[in-house]
Image: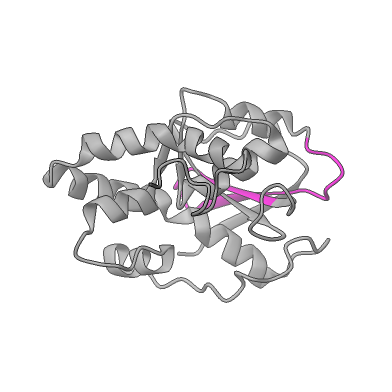
Amino acid sequence: MSAKIYLHSGDLPDGVDFGAAVAVDTETLGLNPERDRLCLVQLSAGDGRAHLVQFSGEDYGAPNLRRLLGDVGCVKIFHYARFDLAVLSRWLGVRCEPVWCTKVASKIARTYSERHGLKDLCEELLGVKINKSQQSSDWGAGDLSDAQRQYAANDVLYLHRLREVLAEMLKREGRDVLARECFNFLPTRARLDLLGWNDDDRDVFKH
């Protein structure tokens, strides 16, 4: 996909419309939402365009972005929503609802496979190969490289299409209602993570 990538500083500009569903992803300095700051939020309407909102770490006001993420009339599509929801709650103070997670959907629909990463889903379900080599790069850098921008964009450009394919699979197998119930719980699961119930020893769902 030849995508158009727009980089914004600190917030989305006025007037950007994502319609009824927006694909969302985040890049951080690490995997601890409390410790590792939010550096980038990527968004796409599934139209071949990606909007990247970069944060310097000094100001997370972002009224336009927060308004979009908190809009209950717009579905937020994630891959591994549990992490992104915790990050967005911690740094932007927003609870995203309703949510649709392609990773959860894949695990419920694709029980024939143990491969549920975004790269695997894009290749199997869409016939698209994406490059994940920038996954561990420095997202706090002031100037993002072209490779980083493309990597960040790829994380949202295909989520709408994946949602369509996985939704059909879930419906076919009679698991669509189950998936929806899981999606509805994800904001609470993310809140539990932020409050410390986020490992095997303290997981409230473990015996």
Q: Is 33 rendered above or below residue 20?
A: below
Q: Where is residue 190 in the image (x, y as percent from the top left)?
A: 53, 40
Q: What stretch is highlighted in magenta?
A: 40-60
Q: Camera-side residue: 12 or 187?
A: 187
Left/right placement of residue 139 relative to residue 109 reads: right
Residue 161: tell me if it is visible: no
Quadrant location of the N terminus in the rendered image: bottom left
Look at 28% across and 40% down and name the residue there.
179
Residue 77: tell me if it is visible: yes
Instruction: Give residue 142's quadrant in the image.
Output: bottom right
Q: Camera-side residue: 67 or 117?
A: 117
Toward the front, the furthest residue is 207
Toward the right, the furthest residue is 58
Q: Camera-side residue: 13 or 200?
A: 200
Q: Is 1 rendered above or below residue 196?
A: below
Q: Is 64 rendered above or below residue 175?
A: above
Look at 68% across and 61% down and name the residue there.
30
Look at 33% across and 68% down and name the residue there.
115
Q: Where is residue 49 in the image (x, y as percent from the top left)?
A: 54, 51
Look at 63% across and 45% down and name the residue there.
87
Was residue 90 drawn as part of the magenta stretch in this picture? no
Q: Is 84 rendered above or below residue 177?
A: below
Q: Where is residue 148 in the image (x, y as percent from the top left)?
A: 66, 67
Was residue 44 drawn as part of the magenta stretch in this picture? yes
